């Protein structure tokens, strides 16, 4: 019989989430001509749920008058990007001034093309652990 030990799950400070690095655009390069790496913070489940819950919209079905919640996908994308991008510092007023914008999301949209924003969001979600489907995770656990 397999021995199970819950102590491996104890919060002993050993497991730290790391910052992922991602080249969001080839237009921003360092002195060697290499793409600048953006830093993406990994959130815990509680932090992500806080963002997700802030993006809920209550709607009423006009025919049945039932109330239900749905998630505003654009708001979720914006809040997740702003929360997870750690470098460059999107709240830096000097950086915002250089693009003539106010606010983190406006800065991000001014800095990147629409395709780059979409790719950055994919990278942010992968950093959060959304890259593998459930069947892939089950196979990993079996091996």
Image (spheres, rainbow, N blue to C red):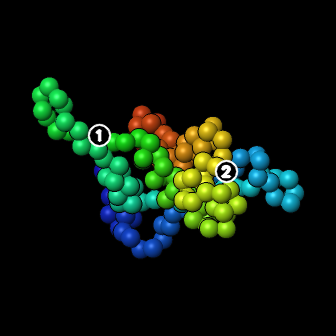
Q: 21 or 65, which lies in front?
A: 65
User: In the rendering, at what x and y percent does residue 54 appear?
Assistant: 34, 54
Q: Secondary structure at mark 2?
A: helix
User: In the rendering, at what x and y percent does residue 130 appear?
Assistant: 47, 44
Residue 52 vs residue 100: left or right?
A: left
Q: 57 or 126, which lies in front?
A: 57
Q: Which residue is mark 2?
A: 111
Residue 35 vs residue 44: left or right?
A: right
Q: Which residue is mark 1?
A: 70
Q: Is residue 60 visible?
A: yes
- What is the residue that sits farthest to the front in this orientation? 100
Mark with earlier residue (2, 1)? 1
- What is the residue that sits farthest to the bottom in this orientation? 12
Tell me which residue sits at (66%, 41%) in the image: 113
Disc 2 to disc 1, C-alpha distance:
30 Å
- What is the residue that sits farthest to the right in this orientation? 32
User: In the rendering, at what x and y percent does residue 48 appear?
Assistant: 39, 55
Please report contact status of discs 2 and 1: CB closer than 8 Å, yes or no. no
Residue 110 vs residue 1: left or right?
A: right
Among the 4 quarters of the image, the one containing residue 89: bottom right
Q: Is residue 119 visible?
A: no
User: In the rendering, at what x and y percent does residue 62 appear?
Assistant: 17, 29
Tell me which residue sits at (36%, 69%) in the image: 10
Tell me which residue sits at (29%, 40%) in the image: 70
The residue carrying pointer 1 sits among few (fewer than 14), some (14 to 19) or many (20 or more) residues within 10 Å by Cα, namely few
């Amino acid at each position: 019989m397999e021995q199970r030990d819950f102590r491996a799950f104890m919060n002993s400070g050993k497991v730290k989430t790391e910052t992922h690095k991602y080249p969001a655009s080839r237009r921003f390069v360092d002195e060697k001509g290499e793409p600048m790496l953006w830093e993406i913070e990994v959130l815990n489940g509680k932090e992500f749920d806080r963002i997700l819950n802030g993006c809920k919209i209550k709607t009423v079905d006009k025919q049945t008058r039932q109330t239900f919640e749905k998630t505003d996908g654009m708001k979720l994308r914006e809040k997740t990007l702003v929360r997870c991008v750690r470098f460059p510092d999107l709240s830096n007023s000097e950086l915002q001034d250089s693009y003539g914008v106010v606010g983190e999301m406006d800065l991000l949209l001014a800095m990147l093309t629409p395709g780059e924003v979409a790719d950055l969001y994919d990278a942010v979600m992968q950093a959060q652990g959304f890259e593998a489907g459930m069947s892939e995770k089950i196979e990993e656990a079996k091996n």
